[in-house]
Image (spheres, rainbow, N blue to C red):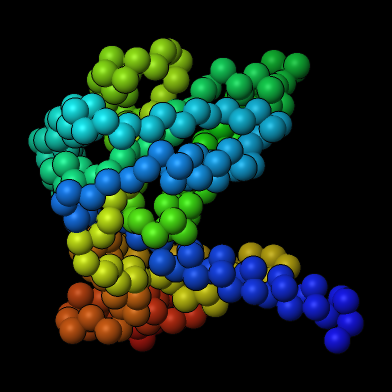
Amino acid sequence: MSERAVAQADHTVDYDALIDVMRRRRSVRRFEKGRQIDRDTLMRIAEAARWAPTGANTQCFDVLIVDDPDMRDKVLEVFLRQSNRLIAHVKGFPAVKKTYLANTVAIVVVLGDPRWKASFPNATDSDWEDEYHANNENILLASIGAAIQNVQLAVTACGLTSAWLSGGGEATTNRELSDLLGYPDPLIAYGTIPIGYPEKDVSLRWRRPVEQIVHWNGYEKDKLRPQELVDFYVEKLRPFAMYRGVEEMRDWEDFEEKAGEWADALTGPTVGPRGKDR
Protein backbone atom coordinates (compact mmCIF):
# COMPACT_ATOMS: atom_id res chain seq x y z
CA MET A 1 0.00 0.00 0.00
CA SER A 2 1.36 3.43 -0.96
CA GLU A 3 2.08 6.12 1.64
CA ARG A 4 -0.80 8.16 0.23
CA ALA A 5 -3.21 5.23 0.55
CA VAL A 6 -2.08 4.64 4.13
CA ALA A 7 -2.63 8.32 4.93
CA GLN A 8 -6.12 8.21 3.41
CA ALA A 9 -6.93 5.10 5.45
CA ASP A 10 -5.74 6.87 8.60
CA HIS A 11 -8.01 9.82 7.83
CA THR A 12 -10.92 7.41 7.42
CA VAL A 13 -10.25 6.12 10.92
CA ASP A 14 -10.19 9.72 12.18
CA TYR A 15 -13.51 10.45 10.48
CA ASP A 16 -15.16 7.31 11.82
CA ALA A 17 -14.07 8.18 15.36
CA LEU A 18 -15.26 11.77 14.98
CA ILE A 19 -18.68 10.91 13.55
CA ASP A 20 -19.13 8.32 16.31
CA VAL A 21 -18.58 11.00 18.96
CA MET A 22 -20.97 13.34 17.13
CA ARG A 23 -23.69 10.71 16.97
CA ARG A 24 -23.29 9.85 20.65
CA ARG A 25 -23.52 13.47 21.80
CA ARG A 26 -26.83 14.01 23.56
CA SER A 27 -28.61 16.71 25.48
CA VAL A 28 -29.36 14.72 28.63
CA ARG A 29 -31.59 15.76 31.51
CA ARG A 30 -31.21 12.83 33.89
CA PHE A 31 -27.81 12.41 35.53
CA GLU A 32 -26.59 9.85 38.05
CA LYS A 33 -26.42 11.03 41.64
CA GLY A 34 -23.25 11.03 43.69
CA ARG A 35 -20.70 11.06 40.86
CA GLN A 36 -17.58 13.21 40.73
CA ILE A 37 -15.13 14.43 38.10
CA ASP A 38 -11.47 15.39 38.37
CA ARG A 39 -10.10 18.70 37.16
CA ASP A 40 -7.77 17.00 34.69
CA THR A 41 -10.84 15.83 32.76
CA LEU A 42 -12.40 19.28 32.97
CA MET A 43 -9.20 20.81 31.62
CA ARG A 44 -9.28 18.38 28.70
CA ILE A 45 -12.78 19.63 27.93
CA ALA A 46 -11.61 23.24 28.17
CA GLU A 47 -8.70 22.41 25.85
CA ALA A 48 -11.20 21.36 23.19
CA ALA A 49 -12.93 24.74 23.47
CA ARG A 50 -9.57 26.45 23.02
CA TRP A 51 -9.26 25.03 19.51
CA ALA A 52 -12.60 26.34 18.27
CA PRO A 53 -12.37 28.50 15.13
CA THR A 54 -13.24 32.15 15.72
CA GLY A 55 -13.60 35.20 13.51
CA ALA A 56 -10.26 36.98 12.94
CA ASN A 57 -8.77 34.45 15.42
CA THR A 58 -10.11 36.68 18.20
CA GLN A 59 -10.77 33.73 20.54
CA CYS A 60 -13.67 35.84 21.76
CA PHE A 61 -14.77 33.63 24.64
CA ASP A 62 -13.78 32.41 28.09
CA VAL A 63 -14.67 29.14 29.78
CA LEU A 64 -15.92 29.36 33.36
CA ILE A 65 -16.17 25.97 35.09
CA VAL A 66 -18.27 25.43 38.21
CA ASP A 67 -17.25 22.26 40.07
CA ASP A 68 -17.93 23.35 43.66
CA PRO A 69 -21.20 21.72 44.83
CA ASP A 70 -22.37 24.79 46.75
CA MET A 71 -21.79 27.10 43.79
CA ARG A 72 -23.40 24.55 41.47
CA ASP A 73 -26.54 24.65 43.61
CA LYS A 74 -26.60 28.44 43.40
CA VAL A 75 -26.35 28.24 39.60
CA LEU A 76 -29.22 25.74 39.73
CA GLU A 77 -31.35 28.30 41.55
CA VAL A 78 -30.69 30.84 38.79
CA PHE A 79 -31.90 28.41 36.14
CA LEU A 80 -34.91 27.32 38.17
CA ARG A 81 -36.02 30.94 38.14
CA GLN A 82 -35.28 31.13 34.42
CA SER A 83 -37.40 28.02 33.82
CA ASN A 84 -40.27 29.51 35.79
CA ARG A 85 -40.10 32.66 33.66
CA LEU A 86 -40.34 30.54 30.51
CA ILE A 87 -43.41 28.78 31.83
CA ALA A 88 -45.02 32.08 32.83
CA HIS A 89 -44.08 34.29 29.90
CA VAL A 90 -43.30 32.01 26.92
CA LYS A 91 -46.55 30.13 26.62
CA GLY A 92 -46.41 26.99 24.52
CA PHE A 93 -42.66 26.43 24.66
CA PRO A 94 -41.94 22.91 25.99
CA ALA A 95 -39.76 24.12 28.86
CA VAL A 96 -38.15 21.58 31.18
CA LYS A 97 -37.62 22.14 34.89
CA LYS A 98 -33.91 22.49 35.61
CA THR A 99 -33.92 20.40 38.81
CA TYR A 100 -31.72 17.79 37.08
CA LEU A 101 -28.81 20.22 37.40
CA ALA A 102 -28.49 19.14 41.03
CA ASN A 103 -26.87 15.88 39.86
CA THR A 104 -24.28 17.43 37.56
CA VAL A 105 -20.60 16.95 38.31
CA ALA A 106 -19.73 20.34 36.83
CA ILE A 107 -21.21 23.20 34.83
CA VAL A 108 -19.30 24.82 31.97
CA VAL A 109 -20.27 28.39 31.13
CA VAL A 110 -19.06 29.72 27.77
CA LEU A 111 -18.76 33.49 28.06
CA GLY A 112 -18.71 35.56 24.89
CA ASP A 113 -17.05 38.96 24.69
CA PRO A 114 -18.81 41.26 22.18
CA ARG A 115 -15.96 43.81 22.26
CA TRP A 116 -14.06 41.62 19.83
CA LYS A 117 -16.52 42.48 17.08
CA ALA A 118 -14.23 45.45 16.50
CA SER A 119 -11.81 42.96 14.89
CA PHE A 120 -14.35 41.88 12.29
CA PRO A 121 -15.01 43.82 9.06
CA ASN A 122 -16.38 47.25 10.01
CA ALA A 123 -17.66 49.63 7.37
CA THR A 124 -15.83 52.88 6.72
CA ASP A 125 -18.75 54.00 4.55
CA SER A 126 -21.86 55.06 6.51
CA ASP A 127 -24.14 53.54 3.88
CA TRP A 128 -22.82 50.09 4.80
CA GLU A 129 -22.63 50.42 8.59
CA ASP A 130 -25.86 48.56 9.34
CA GLU A 131 -24.99 45.65 7.06
CA TYR A 132 -21.53 45.08 8.49
CA HIS A 133 -22.74 45.63 12.05
CA ALA A 134 -25.32 42.87 11.61
CA ASN A 135 -22.76 40.55 10.03
CA ASN A 136 -20.31 41.12 12.88
CA GLU A 137 -22.97 39.89 15.29
CA ASN A 138 -23.32 36.77 13.15
CA ILE A 139 -19.55 36.21 13.20
CA LEU A 140 -19.48 36.54 16.99
CA LEU A 141 -22.32 34.07 17.49
CA ALA A 142 -20.83 31.58 15.02
CA SER A 143 -17.49 31.78 16.84
CA ILE A 144 -19.02 31.19 20.27
CA GLY A 145 -21.20 28.42 18.85
CA ALA A 146 -18.08 26.62 17.63
CA ALA A 147 -16.63 26.74 21.16
CA ILE A 148 -19.87 25.39 22.63
CA GLN A 149 -19.90 22.55 20.09
CA ASN A 150 -16.28 21.66 20.89
CA VAL A 151 -17.13 21.49 24.59
CA GLN A 152 -20.11 19.24 23.91
CA LEU A 153 -18.06 16.86 21.76
CA ALA A 154 -15.19 16.74 24.25
CA VAL A 155 -17.63 15.91 27.05
CA THR A 156 -18.88 12.96 25.01
CA ALA A 157 -15.36 11.83 24.10
CA CYS A 158 -14.48 11.82 27.83
CA GLY A 159 -17.32 9.40 28.56
CA LEU A 160 -19.74 11.91 30.05
CA THR A 161 -22.83 13.62 28.75
CA SER A 162 -24.25 17.11 28.85
CA ALA A 163 -27.11 19.45 28.10
CA TRP A 164 -27.07 22.96 26.66
CA LEU A 165 -28.87 25.79 28.42
CA SER A 166 -29.18 28.83 26.18
CA GLY A 167 -31.06 30.84 28.81
CA GLY A 168 -27.86 32.46 30.09
CA GLY A 169 -28.01 34.70 27.06
CA GLU A 170 -31.23 36.24 28.33
CA ALA A 171 -30.53 39.59 29.98
CA THR A 172 -32.14 38.71 33.32
CA THR A 173 -30.43 35.34 33.63
CA ASN A 174 -27.10 36.76 32.51
CA ARG A 175 -27.28 39.47 35.18
CA GLU A 176 -27.99 36.88 37.86
CA LEU A 177 -25.14 34.65 36.69
CA SER A 178 -22.79 37.62 36.48
CA ASP A 179 -23.63 38.66 40.05
CA LEU A 180 -23.15 35.10 41.27
CA LEU A 181 -20.03 34.09 39.33
CA GLY A 182 -18.34 37.48 39.23
CA TYR A 183 -17.75 37.91 35.52
CA PRO A 184 -17.85 41.56 34.41
CA ASP A 185 -19.64 43.45 31.69
CA PRO A 186 -19.70 43.07 28.75
CA LEU A 187 -19.33 39.28 28.98
CA ILE A 188 -22.46 37.23 28.26
CA ALA A 189 -23.16 33.60 29.18
CA TYR A 190 -24.15 32.45 25.71
CA GLY A 191 -23.91 28.77 26.60
CA THR A 192 -24.32 27.01 29.94
CA ILE A 193 -23.42 23.32 29.73
CA PRO A 194 -24.21 21.01 32.67
CA ILE A 195 -22.02 17.90 32.65
CA GLY A 196 -22.74 14.55 34.26
CA TYR A 197 -22.98 10.81 33.91
CA PRO A 198 -26.22 9.69 32.24
CA GLU A 199 -28.66 7.89 34.51
CA LYS A 200 -29.38 5.54 31.62
CA ASP A 201 -28.34 5.06 28.02
CA VAL A 202 -29.85 7.80 25.92
CA SER A 203 -31.09 6.97 22.47
CA LEU A 204 -30.53 9.08 19.40
CA ARG A 205 -32.68 12.08 18.54
CA TRP A 206 -34.51 12.47 15.25
CA ARG A 207 -32.45 13.95 12.42
CA ARG A 208 -33.46 14.99 8.92
CA PRO A 209 -32.17 12.74 6.11
CA VAL A 210 -28.83 13.90 4.76
CA GLU A 211 -30.26 13.87 1.21
CA GLN A 212 -32.71 16.56 2.28
CA ILE A 213 -30.13 18.98 3.69
CA VAL A 214 -27.47 18.70 0.96
CA HIS A 215 -27.51 20.90 -2.16
CA TRP A 216 -25.05 20.45 -5.03
CA ASN A 217 -23.59 23.47 -6.85
CA GLY A 218 -26.55 25.68 -6.04
CA TYR A 219 -29.62 25.71 -3.83
CA GLU A 220 -32.30 23.21 -4.85
CA LYS A 221 -35.45 25.24 -4.30
CA ASP A 222 -37.72 22.22 -4.03
CA LYS A 223 -35.89 21.40 -0.78
CA LEU A 224 -36.91 24.64 0.92
CA ARG A 225 -39.21 23.58 3.72
CA PRO A 226 -42.53 25.40 3.33
CA GLN A 227 -43.82 27.79 5.97
CA GLU A 228 -46.71 25.41 6.63
CA LEU A 229 -44.21 22.76 7.76
CA VAL A 230 -42.46 25.25 10.05
CA ASP A 231 -45.83 26.18 11.56
CA PHE A 232 -46.79 22.52 11.98
CA TYR A 233 -43.51 21.77 13.76
CA VAL A 234 -43.88 24.71 16.16
CA GLU A 235 -47.55 24.12 16.92
CA LYS A 236 -47.80 20.32 16.93
CA LEU A 237 -44.54 18.38 16.66
CA ARG A 238 -41.91 20.33 18.59
CA PRO A 239 -42.18 18.70 22.06
CA PHE A 240 -41.99 15.21 20.55
CA ALA A 241 -39.11 15.97 18.17
CA MET A 242 -37.18 17.66 20.97
CA TYR A 243 -37.37 14.91 23.57
CA ARG A 244 -38.18 11.53 22.04
CA GLY A 245 -35.17 9.21 21.99
CA VAL A 246 -35.56 7.71 18.52
CA GLU A 247 -33.42 8.62 15.53
CA GLU A 248 -35.89 7.43 12.89
CA MET A 249 -39.18 9.25 13.33
CA ARG A 250 -40.94 6.46 11.45
CA ASP A 251 -40.12 4.21 14.41
CA TRP A 252 -42.47 6.20 16.63
CA GLU A 253 -45.48 4.04 17.44
CA ASP A 254 -47.77 6.99 16.73
CA PHE A 255 -45.73 8.36 13.82
CA GLU A 256 -48.58 8.60 11.31
CA GLU A 257 -50.79 10.29 13.87
CA LYS A 258 -48.14 12.80 14.93
CA ALA A 259 -46.68 13.53 11.48
CA GLY A 260 -49.90 13.56 9.49
CA GLU A 261 -49.56 14.88 5.95
CA TRP A 262 -45.95 15.89 6.69
CA ALA A 263 -44.75 12.30 7.24
CA ASP A 264 -42.72 12.15 4.02
CA ALA A 265 -41.33 15.67 4.47
CA LEU A 266 -40.00 14.77 7.92
CA THR A 267 -38.36 11.49 6.94
CA GLY A 268 -37.62 11.46 3.21
CA PRO A 269 -35.83 13.47 0.53
CA THR A 270 -38.86 15.65 -0.30
CA VAL A 271 -40.20 18.44 1.91
CA GLY A 272 -43.76 18.97 0.69
CA PRO A 273 -46.99 17.66 2.24
CA ARG A 274 -48.04 14.15 1.29
CA GLY A 275 -50.00 13.91 -1.93
CA LYS A 276 -49.37 17.50 -3.01
CA ASP A 277 -46.97 18.85 -5.60
CA ARG A 278 -44.81 21.82 -4.75
Return the residue nearer the eye: 11 or 128.
Answer: 11
* Residue occupying the point 26% across, 69% down: 201
**Does residue 118 lie above or below 56 as drawn?**
above
The spot of residue 243 in percent (x, y) is 24, 62
Residue at x 61%, y 22% (from the top left corner): 116
Quadrant housing residue 221: bottom right
Residue drawn at the location 75% of the way across and 17% of the way down: 125
For the point 26% across and 18% down, which residue is it?
180
Depth check: give the residue in front, 55 or 16.
16
Q: Is residue 71 above or below residue 276?
A: above
Tell me where residue 151 appears, x and y as whole percent: 47, 46
Quarter of the picture holding the N terminus: bottom right
Q: Is residue 97 above or below residue 79?
A: below
Q: Which residue is more in the foreground, 43 or 97?
A: 43
In this rendering, the answer to whether 244 lies above or below 105 is below
In this picture, residue 159 sits left or right of residue 87: right
Q: Position of residue 113 (x, y in %)?
A: 51, 23
